[in-house]
Structures are given as C-alpha cells and as structure tokens.
Image (cartoon, rainbow, N blue to C red):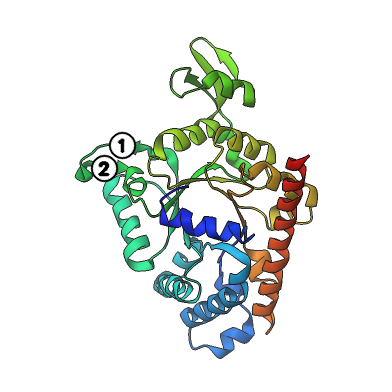
Amino acid sequence: MSDCKFVTLLEERWKKGKFACVGLDSELGKIPDCLKMQTSDSTSAVVKFNTEIIKTTAEHVCCFKPNGAFYLGEGTAGMTALDRTFRIAGQLAPSIPLILDLKVGDIGNTNRGYLKLLLEHLCGNAITVNPYVGAHWDPDPTKHDGLQIFLEEKDIGVFVLCRTSNKGATAIQERPVIVGEAEFEHMQALATAVDWKGTAGGYIMPFYQYIALLVDRVWNRHGNCALVVGANHPKQLAAVRELCPKIPILIPAFGKQIQGEENIVKQTVFAGLDASGGGIICNNSRNIIFASGGENYAEAAGEAAKKFNDEISGFVCDWHDAAKQ
C-alpha cells in the first residue's frame, strides 16, 4: 500500500466498490438553459451546475476530474469557475480525490507554476502530465527539472499519459523502440509475457510500453504515480497491466467512444484490474453530466453515474468469480 494521500483516498473508494470517475467537462454551451436563466453570469452558471452534479454523483464515484480546457477556454470567468469548483468539491465530498486534467509537462520553472496552481489555488489531489520532457533526478530541490517537480510531491497523484484513445495516437505511442536488456529487471520474463521481439542486446517494444515501465520502475519512487490508458484499447491496457501489476490506471473514453459496446467495456475492466480487484479509475464525462438538458439535469446525472458504476462493479464481480475458478 502506498503512503501517498491521493492513493490512500482512492483505495478507500475502491473498497466501497466505487470505480467510476465523473469528468467535470462542464462546457458552458451545453449547460441547461434553465440553469443559465437562474444565474447572473457564466461563472455562476458553471459553478452551480458543477455543485449540483457533485451532490448527486458523489456517492457513486471514486474520483472527480475537471478538464482544464473547458474552463481555460472561458478566460477569467472559466478560471474562477474552476477554482470554485475544486473548493466546493473539497467541501461537499472531502473523501473523494480531485484530479486536475491538464496533461502538462515542461521545464522546471514552468512545472512549478502548474504545481502551485494545483496545490495552493485549487487544493487538488492529482494532475495529469505528459511524459515527453522526462524527469531529471537531483537531490537538490533547486535543480529539480521536468516531471520530477511533480513526482517529488509525495501526497499527490501523478497521472502519466501512456496510451491515449485518440485516432492519431498510434503514430507515436505504438512506434517500436529498442530497449536494452539491462535497463529494467526481469526483462526476459516480461518479453515472454507481452511478446516482445528480441534483438542484439535488447528487446523491441511499442513506445507506450516503454513509458509504462519507466513510470512504474523508475519514476514511481514515492508510490504516487499512475498511468492513463484509453478504454477503447483493451489489448494495450492488458499489456500495461501485465508490465505494471500494481499501479493505478486512469481509463478515459468510457463515454461516446465505446457507448453501447458492452463486450469492450467488460474486456477493458478485466484488462485493467490489478491482482486485488482494484486499480482502475473509469472516466465518463458527457454521458453523465449532460444526461439531461432539462431541469432534472442533476438527478439524471446521479442516475447515470449510478448506472455506470453499477455496470463497472458488476464486471468487477464477474472478474472475482472468474478468478476463483
């Protein structure tokens, strides 16, 4: 078990059978007109909408995940709404961790600004990051660079993009790379498990699998790392879980991308679960928060969140039953 505060909160939700994550992608143009008429400005409309969504969905989820793009796009009003949303969520549901979805990753000084936003202004529990800049390890805090800025914060979750769900992901994330056989432990056993091809002095693997290993074996020094793997790629997700048996995995794209494809949803859940029957954060955004465009928007969101988590929990039970056989 990790000592990371974020992971501790998350594990408590998993114990209660909560695997759903509600993405608070509260696009102003989609907020019900009835709510806009009740509020004086766009900030108030978004905050009121998010507040009611949080109230009705909190009992069914393991996390909330506001995506910064939907707030930054509204300028100052959006940033104010994001700040207030985080603070209200912390008050209404203090046991449910909050993930800031920004997919950041830059040099040291820039990342310190993002970290300050997360910790001092939003009081969030986790952040999504891009691995491209790497992590420069130095014992001197003034020399921390790249993702080390986040990784050294032992109580926050750091979600590293690994295999995303978008159509263009293959060009880079599936690109074959050669990794030396001495770079990680037990490379031969891993090669057998995920079917890598051997080459002189190493193995050929997809780039996303190298990222998974790097995060799990090198960057996860404080037990606060997690990975992001899209829900519409259960085969790749299964490979990541094979390589990283214990690390939490945020699985986006459970909404429109695989809507109605129950078999893929089940495959995805089975692929992502860790040995204890936890380890997954199943994100669903628009299908839940915009379940209704009428006055019953909050109640509809609560019902949608319950239905989604019940579906995931049902597959988790199926996984446990299969494991007993």
Number of marks drawn = 2
Q: Residue at x 47, y 23 (%)?
A: 185
Earlier-in-chain disc, 1 versus 2: 1
In the picture as drawn, the residue positioned furthest to the front comes out as: 324
In the picture as drawn, the residue positioned furthest to the top comes out as: 200
Residue 322 visible in the picture: yes
Q: x and y percent of residue 50 in the render?
A: 54, 75
Tell me: residue 32, above or below residue 218.
Answer: below
Q: Residue at x 58, y 89 (%)?
A: 37
Mark 1 neighbour density, 10 Å: few (under 14) some (14–19) many (20 or more): some
Q: Quadrant of the C terminus?
A: top right
Q: Secondary structure at mark 2?
A: loop
Foreground: 86 or 187?
Answer: 187
Q: Secondary structure at mark 1?
A: strand
For badge 2, the amino acid type reads His
Q: x and y percent of residue 233 in the render?
A: 67, 41
Tell me: residue 48, above or below residue 182.
Answer: below
Residue under pointer 2? 144
